[in-house]
Amino acid sequence: MPPKTKEEIELEINENIKNRIIEPISPSVELIQRTENMASLIWKAARVCYSIKSMPELEQEWNETPDEKRIGLIIGLMQRGHRTTYSHPNFSFVIVCSRVVSHQIVRHQVGVTIDQESQRYVPYEDGFRYIEPENIDGEKYKVIMEKAHDQYMTIYKEFRLSGQGKRESAELARYVLPSSISTRMVCTTSLAALLHLNDVRVQGGTGRPQEETKVVCCEMVRLALEAEPWLKPAFIDKKKEATAIPTV
């Protein structure tokens, strides 16, 4: 297939601009995978530190230990901060949020792995969706987002018509994209990292969390507890018993 002419490229871009979609969406979280037999894994990791028993022997000991005692040991490890034992199990989420929130989550480097929608490889010719900040006039904010897309497309179109490809043009135009633009990412956290996210981004262990970040991380915790309800005591800060924890 012959390459498109400059006229064809301009016509295609103008058509995309004409039919663009600029609209707000809500942040969302979906749990897509987690470590199986999580409690058993943590318990065995802890017992290896204090026992010379083989894995089959530890498996037998696990099966013979009352559930209340097994869970008590595991939760006790978490509450005392023995991080390595509960760094083994993971939760994997698909998260839709603003770039503001994704930038905050990626700061939690230990135990957090992220693959995120790339603004280099995903051109926004036909618009984008965004997350509205709290306490803002939605209609006025939409106008601002439309103007932001106008700026993006001005740069994108200029480079496309100068002979650059879609990826190269998107790579250069992304510099003017707003931080409220929605992004999608797969985020895998160790249980230890999720507990830290809960402390910082939900309970405000280092200061008041930003609202959208709190909503996203609260939902991550809620889904984790829905899948593994026995973990709930580990997510309660003994110093902040009055702080609401996501209910299962």
Image (cartoon, rainbow, N blue to C red):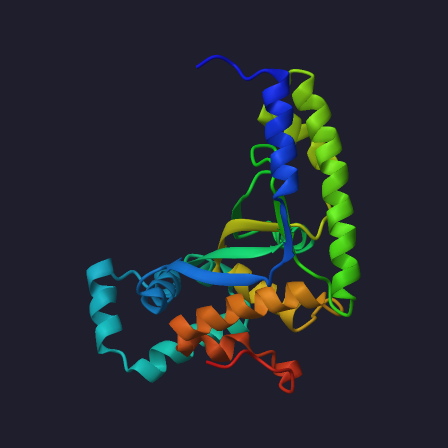
The one nearer the camera, 107 or 150, is: 150
Residue 73 in view of the camera: no
Of the 4 image quadrants, the one containing the N terminus is: top left
Residue in the image at 74% along x and 30% along y: 155
- Pinpoint residue 101: horizontal percent, then vertical percent: 66, 56
- Pinpoint residue 17: horizontal percent, then vertical percent: 65, 39
- Furthest toward the top, the residue is 2
Question: In this rendering, would 58 be left or right of 136?
Answer: left
Residue in the image at 71% along x and 35% along y: 153
- Rendered position, 200 above or below 17: below
The one nearer the camera, 224 or 205, is: 224
Q: Quadrant of residue 39?
A: bottom left
The one nearer the camera, 44 or 109, is: 109
Question: In this rendering, would 10 be left or right of 91?
Answer: right
- Pinpoint residue 84: horizontal percent, then vertical percent: 48, 58
Residue 128 in view of the camera: yes
Residue in the image at 57% along x and 36% along y: 122
Question: In this rendering, would 171 be left or right of 112?
Answer: right
- Pinpoint residue 51: horizontal percent, then vertical percent: 33, 64
- Rendered position, 106 above or below 153: below
